[in-house]
């Protein structure tokens, strides 16, 4: 009897132990499942472009606007990797030695991985690539903004016209570039006509400092092709170094459509600049690699006025901007009288940005500040810097 009771107690103990082990395994499996359920295993090193050893499975979780997704966004999605807030780790802990970034071919680039079963949280936000560097888009304050366009009849747009551009806006966005051993600034990634009449996107720069005061045209007319200022700018281009000349896109066409009124909003200016509207027989396009900014460049560079948001400012004519202080947070507002590239549809005036912040047509024979502008080739890449005044982006060309 004692032996039977002992066996019974022993069997019960074994049962309890087995039950406990099974419970622990189940709980562990649930925890492990929850830990990896939102992650996709990836052993495809065509996606992982970093120089790393084959150390086993790597797990990815994709977040788009902070919402978990089953797949990574593609290049055409309008999203880029938020490198600042994406991270990798092992055993639930962040590993700061692991760096994650996104190539302009939309490949994940990982460095510093040494452990199997590494998990990476990849967070995607609105943005685009600027010269090979991923830049987040913002909706307020200083930074890179999405700009949406509608095609308008009569403008020089074809089927390749992109409805989305990216513009730096605000009082002082991080868009400084070291160019020609000087500080220039990126206007953004904008639509531009090429010499084959196709519309493509290029990064547009403007010099940070004026080269001085010059008339738009000493002869007094509004024909850019034969203007005295176009000759001044050609002379500046002739002074560029060989390496800088390689960075310029030599296949672009400057649109120089003109307006016949001061009552134009930013988007109206954008369409008129690209129209075939000029005075009499003046050309509405011009070949060359150096020019000036457009009134619309100035308009899209605001993040809003003192008491108005960005979209509200877009609703007012640029001639009215100083009335609503929309120039207050516009980095292209220099508090000087500056010429733009755009002529009026009269024979002797072109548009200027005034020291008060509004835009209107003035006689071309008068002198105003000049800020040269260029478009960069697609072969140019950012290799260092963060876009601030003290650490401007450094460029290299293939």
Image (tube, grey):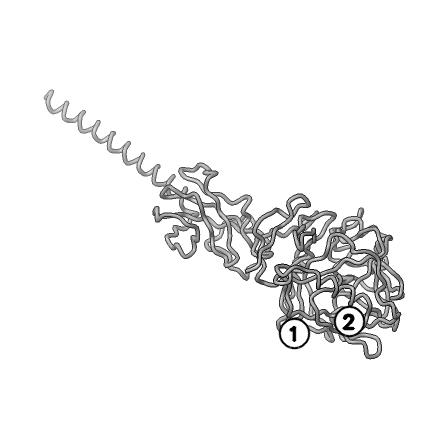
State how many labels appear.
2
Mark 1 neighbour class, 10 Å CA radius: few under 14, some 14 to 19, many 20 or more: some
* Residue 285 at x, y percent in the picture: 74, 73
Q: Residue furthest bottom?
A: 281
Mark 2 or mark 1: name the one nearer the start of the chain: 1
Q: Residue furthest top?
A: 2
Disc 2 versus disc 1: distance between alpha carbons?
16 Å
Residue 360: which numbered mark, if any?
Answer: none
Report helix, strand or loop for mark 2.
Answer: loop
| On screen, residue 159 above or below 96 | below
Position of the N terminus by quadrant: top left
Nearer-the-camera pick, 52 or 179: 179
| On screen, residue 282 above or below 12 | below
**Residue underneath mark 2:** 257
- Residue at horizontal 67%, vertical 63%? 375
Report helix, strand or loop for mark 1.
Answer: loop
Nearer-the-camera pick, 28 or 44: 44
* Residue 156 at x, y percent in the picture: 70, 74
- Residue at horizontal 41%, vertical 39%? 90
Please give left or right for residue 79 compared with residue 39 in the image. Answer: right
Question: Residue 200's image quarter?
Answer: bottom right
- Residue at horizontal 46%, vertical 38%? 94
- Residue at horizontal 73%, vertical 57%? 300
Question: Residue 193's image quarter?
Answer: bottom right
> In the rendered structure, are the residues bearing label 2 and label 1 in contact, judged by CB atoms less than 8 Å apart?
no
Position of the C terminus by quadrant: bottom right
Residue 195: which numbered mark, if any?
Answer: 1
- Which circle, 2 or 1, is nearer the viewer? 1
* Residue 141 at x, y percent in the picture: 70, 47
């Amino acid at each position: 009897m004692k032996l039977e009771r002992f066996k019974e107690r022993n069997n019960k103990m074994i049962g309890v132990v087995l039950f406990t082990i099974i419970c622990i395994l189940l709980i562990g499996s649930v925890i492990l499942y929850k830990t990896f359920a939102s992650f996709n295993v990836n052993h495809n090193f065509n996606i992982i472009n970093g120089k790393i050893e084959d150390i086993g499975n790597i797990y990815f979780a994709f977040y788009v606007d902070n919402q978990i997704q089953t797949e990574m966004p593609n290049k055409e999605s309008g999203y880029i990797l938020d490198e600042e807030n994406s991270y990798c780790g092992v055993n639930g802990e962040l590993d700061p030695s692991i760096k994650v970034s996104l190539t302009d071919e939309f490949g994940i680039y990982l460095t510093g991985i040494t452990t199997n079963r590494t998990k990476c949280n990849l967070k995607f936000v609105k943005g685009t690539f600027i010269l090979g560097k991923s830049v987040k888009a913002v909706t307020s304050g200083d930074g890179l903004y999405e700009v949406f366009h509608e095609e308008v009849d009569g403008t020089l747009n074809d089927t390749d016209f992109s409805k989305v551009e990216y513009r730096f806006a605000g009082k002082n966005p991080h868009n400084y570039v070291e160019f020609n051993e000087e500080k220039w600034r990126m206007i953004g990634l904008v639509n531009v006509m090429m010499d084959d009449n196709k519309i493509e996107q290029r990064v547009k720069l403007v010099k940070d400092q004026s080269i001085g005061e010059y008339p738009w045209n000493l002869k007094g007319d509004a024909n850019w092709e034969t203007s005295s200022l176009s000759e001044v700018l050609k002379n500046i281009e002739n002074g560029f170094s060989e390496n800088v000349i390689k960075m310029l896109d030599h296949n672009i066409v400057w649109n120089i459509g003109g307006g016949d009124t001061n009552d134009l909003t930013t988007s109206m200016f954008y369409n008129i600049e690209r129209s075939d509207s000029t005075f009499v027989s003046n050309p509405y396009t011009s070949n060359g690699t150096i020019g000036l900014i457009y009134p619309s460049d100035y308009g899209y560079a605001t993040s809003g006025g003192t008491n108005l948001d960005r979209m509200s400012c877009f609703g007012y004519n640029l001639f009215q901007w100083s009335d609503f202080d929309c120039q207050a947070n516009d980095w292209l507002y220099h508090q000087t009288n500056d010429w733009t590239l755009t002529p009026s549809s009269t024979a002797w005036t072109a548009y200027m940005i005034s020291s008060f912040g509004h835009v209107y047509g003035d006689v071309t024979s008068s002198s105003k500040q000049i800020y040269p502008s260029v478009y960069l080739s697609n072969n140019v890449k950012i290799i260092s810097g963060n876009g601030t005044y003290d650490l401007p982006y450094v460029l290299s060309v293939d």
